Amino acid sequence: MTSKTKTNINLIWKHTHKDFKGKCSIEKSIMTRGSFGPISHLSDMEFKEELQYAQRKEIRLQRDKALKPIFASHNINPAYLTSTDQGRNTLNDVISLINFVLTGDLATQAIEAVKSAGIAFLEE
């Protein structure tokens, strides 16, 4: 069973689109499967699904936050961080992207910077 802690509720809230969240009374509430209600009142299965989605979104957010200065310092267009997640899901994806835009020592240096940053990726 997934714990309905304040931290988990806040993470779900953070990663729910603004059109699908609001407040019932004073509780943070979201729209799920056609009904609107407090996050804390979701069924265990719904809460787990929403939390897993929010955790994946948080990993992506932190990943891109860590990649942004590395890309900037190696003159890699920051637009690669605002498009779809393709090319950033795994370390191998990022290495392929770097090799696509840089060559030789420049690519090697950028790849080493990414590897040494200890970035968490979704699929490894």
Image: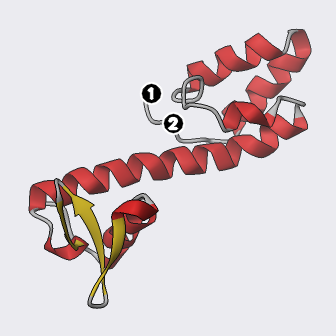
Residue at image point 80% right, 16% down: 101
Q: Which residue is mark 2?
A: 121
Residue designated by label 1: 124
Tell me the quadrant of the picture where the C terminus can be found: top left
Give residue 5's position: percent from left, percent from top. 27, 75
Name the residue: 53% across, 41% down.
120
Q: Total number of numbered labels?
A: 2
User: Residue 107's spot in the image, x, y percent?
Assistant: 82, 17
Classify residue 35 by image quadrant: bottom left
Q: Quadrant of residue 93?
A: top right
| Residue 20 point in image, percent of width and height | 35, 62
Instruction: Say above or below: 67 vs 1.
Output: above
Q: Give the answer, above or below, for where 48 lies relative to 102.
A: below
Task: Describe residue 9's horizontal placement relative to residue 92 as left or right.
Answer: left
Which quarter of the image is occupied by the N terminus? bottom left
Q: Residue at x 51, y 36 (%)?
A: 121
x, y percent for residue 117? 69, 41
As rendered, which of 11 and 107 lies closer to the eye?
11
Q: CA distance from mark 1 to mark 2?
A: 7 Å
Q: Do the residues bearing badges 1 and 2 touch, measured as CB atoms within 8 Å?
A: yes
Q: Secondary structure at mark 2?
A: loop
Give the label on residue 46, or none: none
Q: Is residue 68 above or below residue 86?
A: below
Q: Nearer the viewer, residue 77 or 110?
A: 77
Camera-side residue: 47 or 32? 32
